[in-house]
Image (spheres, rainbow, N blue to C red):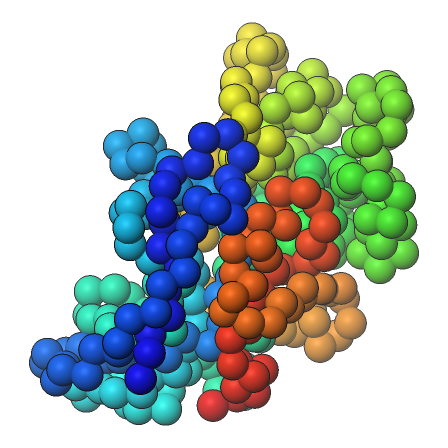
Amino acid sequence: MVNRQWLLARRPEGHAQVSDLELRANAQDESPLAPGEIEVRSLLFLCAPTMRNWMEPPGRSLYPSATLGAPMLAPSGGRIIRSAHPDWPIGADITYFGSWQDVQRLCPDEAGPGRVLPGLSLVDAMGRFGLNPLTAYFGLLRVGVPKQGETLLVSGAAGSVGSVVAQIGRLKGCRVVGIAGGPDKCRWLKDECGVDIAIDYKAAGFDAVLYAACPDGIDIFFDNVGGATLDAAVDRMNKFGRIVLCGQIAGYDGAATAGPRNMMRLVYGSIRMQGFLMGDYADEVPQAVAELRAWAEAGDLAYRDDIRQGFDALPASFLSLFDGTNQGTLLVMTDPAAASPA
């Protein structure tokens, strides 16, 4: 048996390239498992913008750093094919922090994989009820703390996190303004997600359009982008406003970004700016999934998966996150079994 791997061959300088990664096929390790180990065959990978940060050298921040010459780190989903752990049986589907390779070994007591809930496929568990919607859920409800009648501004609003934020905000009674790139994405936000106003950041006069869209200011800004968009939002924040820092995609792929230029507005406005990770709320995940499922089954949440096919497609699929061509949560399926419950 062969174990294919996409290795981080070099750290990107500027924009990441497919050539920064190297495809290698090694013989699968068939040695006995150690007590407590499991072996998983990968069926599905999530591509997220923050993975570009993981390609940077270690020690620069709190995020993980992929090792040069080792498989690229990635949120992964797979099926257990061998087990030396009594609580993790062969045939079970799990999600885990893994890497771009067909087969890998994990120690569940250390690595903390998650079980796929009964009736869900890996596509469900990593897509509409996975990392991105859960990030939206906790970021808005636990950090943003929306209140009826408030104005919620969302950058990257047509993305897989931003679109769920916008819709949960609508469900909580907020007036929702979404920022996206291009008329098609803005139209989808209006027609399918039910935002009150969709702003095309690529159109002329963005600052003036944002001002007009938020005449009474902004109470919550959910930021997936950073850079100039964050600056523009800070200038419109209301007293006691909350800025939820989820991502800074404007600065991921080789571009340098700075923090807000108008820091004194944060001071005098008593404005809270807070970053977070979905894992900060790990104990609440079952409750969050249940609520997301209820909204989805009631028809209250529009959602899109962008599913690419094949292990060879991983690098190019990942890089499409940075040119705006993906539509929804970007998943790369390496086995059709990922689309059906185990």
Q: Where, by quadrant of the figure, is residue 62 drawn?
A: top left
Percent coordinates x, y for residue 122 in the rendering: 51, 77
Q: Is residue 193 visible?
A: yes
Q: Is residue 63 above or below residue 99?
A: above
Percent coordinates x, y for residue 154 in the rendering: 70, 39
**Looking at this view, is 234 or 52 the one in front?**
52
Percent coordinates x, y for residue 342 in the rendering: 47, 90
Residue at 58%, 48% (x, y): give it: 319
- Please state, as top left, top right, bottom left or bottom right, where the N terminus lies in the image: bottom left
Residue at 56%, 84% (x, y): give it: 336
Residue at 51%, 75% (x, y): give it: 334
Percent coordinates x, y for residue 165 in the rendering: 66, 50
**Looking at this view, is 4 or 277 the one in front?**
4
Q: Is residue 209 above or below residue 322?
A: above
Q: Is residue 211 visible?
A: no
Q: Where, by quadrant of the figure, is residue 133 drawn?
A: bottom right
Q: Is residue 113 above or below residue 64?
A: below
Describe residue 145's horizontal placement relative to residue 177 as left or right: left
List the single residue furthest toward the left.
Answer: 35
Describe residue 228's horizontal placement relative to residue 113 as left or right: right
**Looking at this view, is 84 or 219 the one in front?**
84
Describe residue 342's horizontal placement relative to residue 89 as left or right: right
